[in-house]
Image: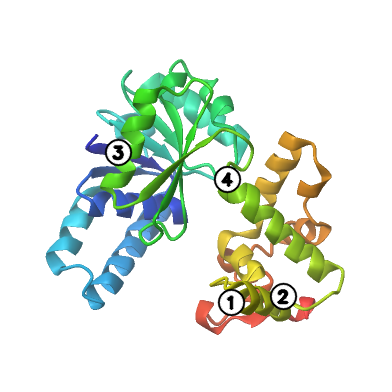
Amino acid sequence: MKNITVIGAGTMGNGIAHTFAQSGYTVKLVDISSDALDKAIATITKNLDRMLSKEKISEEDKNSTLSNITIHTDLSSAVKGADLVVEAATENVDLKLKIFKQLDEVCDKNTILGTNTSSISITKIAAVTNRANKVIGMHFMNPVPIMKLVEVIRGYDTSDETTRKIMDTSKSLGKIPVEVNDYPGFVANRILMPMINESIETLFQGVAGVSEIDTVMMLGMAHPMGPLHLADFIGLDVCLSILEVMYDGFKNPKYAPCPLLVNMVTAGKLGVKSGEGFYNYSEGIKNKKVSKEFV
């Protein structure tokens, strides 16, 4: 397990690539967009520079990490010789099924196929392949280089051997893997997303404002970040997708997305990534202000 291919150069993909490369793995980072790949390398470099300035790594560590990463736009060539492929594409069922069907066709027969999905059924993803025993969930937390948890999700047919390899690999990254079973939202988002959704509902009903809701949860519950700020950080579109998967999977109205969340995503107000969500980030993340529309 030394050759890793990561699919998707977005926030999670570049974080996963960074983490594997810093731990000495050879990493191929794949995306259909050359611009996204260039941006990913720039982000990884910036994050390494930040770690260097805090004396958490050396200049040699930085250079070694970057040298361990190559970028690719062709999937077939990028997965050749991979021991593990980690998919970190957009949280969209149809897209993931398409990717895994293709991966099964072009990867070596012994390659383990991992997905960073935060809610979609591993069993459903595995079903489009001919290697269901080698398909597994590796749900990293954002920001990947810093957060210790990896949710390791077994599909219905995921083998003990595959699970053991992924647990061991996660530990080699300095992470703490936790094995969970395959139900919508797994553990992290099954608990987190209803809380975020209820926070949005509380705002929607006019019980309190954005900063008031976040302050109550930070000061009263010792959360490091308020739920509405966290939703912005995750991406409101991602929150909506996860809630829709859970609502569809459980058929329980408690998982139904708040209308305010639906409207904000429809309007393109996705949080940090779009510059505005419950907060306005036009002057940078550190200078966020409550969006006037929701005061």
Mark 4: which secondary structure? Answer: loop
**Mark 3 or 4, nearer chain start:** 3
**Image: 29 above or below 76:** below
Residue that numbered label 1 is attached to: 281
Residue 213 is marked as 2
Looking at the image, which residue is at 40% across and 56% down?
A: 144
Task: Evaluate if marks 3 and 2 touch, with contact meaning CB atoms under 8 Å apart.
Answer: no
Give me the C-alpha separation between circle 4 and circle 2: 24 Å
Residue that numbered label 4 is attached to: 187
The amino acid pointed to by label 2 is Ile
Residue 225 image point, x, y percent: 57, 72
Residue 177 is marked as none
Task: Evaluate if marks 1 and 4 touch, with contact meaning CB atoms under 8 Å apart.
Answer: no
Residue that numbered label 3 is attached to: 168
The amino acid pointed to by label 4 is Val
Circle 4 packing at 10 Å, graded few (<14), some (14-19), many (20+), is some
The amino acid pointed to by label 3 is Asp
Give me the C-alpha separation between circle 1 and circle 3: 39 Å
Task: Evaluate if marks 1 and 3 touch, with contact meaning CB atoms under 8 Å apart.
Answer: no
Task: Evaluate if marks 1 and 2 touch, with contact meaning CB atoms under 8 Å apart.
Answer: no
Circle 2 packing at 10 Å, graded few (<14), some (14-19), many (20+), is some
Q: Is residue 85 visible?
A: yes
Looking at the image, which residue is at 71% across and 54% down?
A: 194
**Mark 1 or 4, nearer chain start:** 4
Give me the C-alpha separation between circle 3 and circle 2: 40 Å
The amino acid pointed to by label 1 is Tyr
Residue 192 image point, x, y percent: 63, 55
| 219 displayed left or right of 88 | right
Give me the C-alpha separation between circle 1 and circle 4: 30 Å
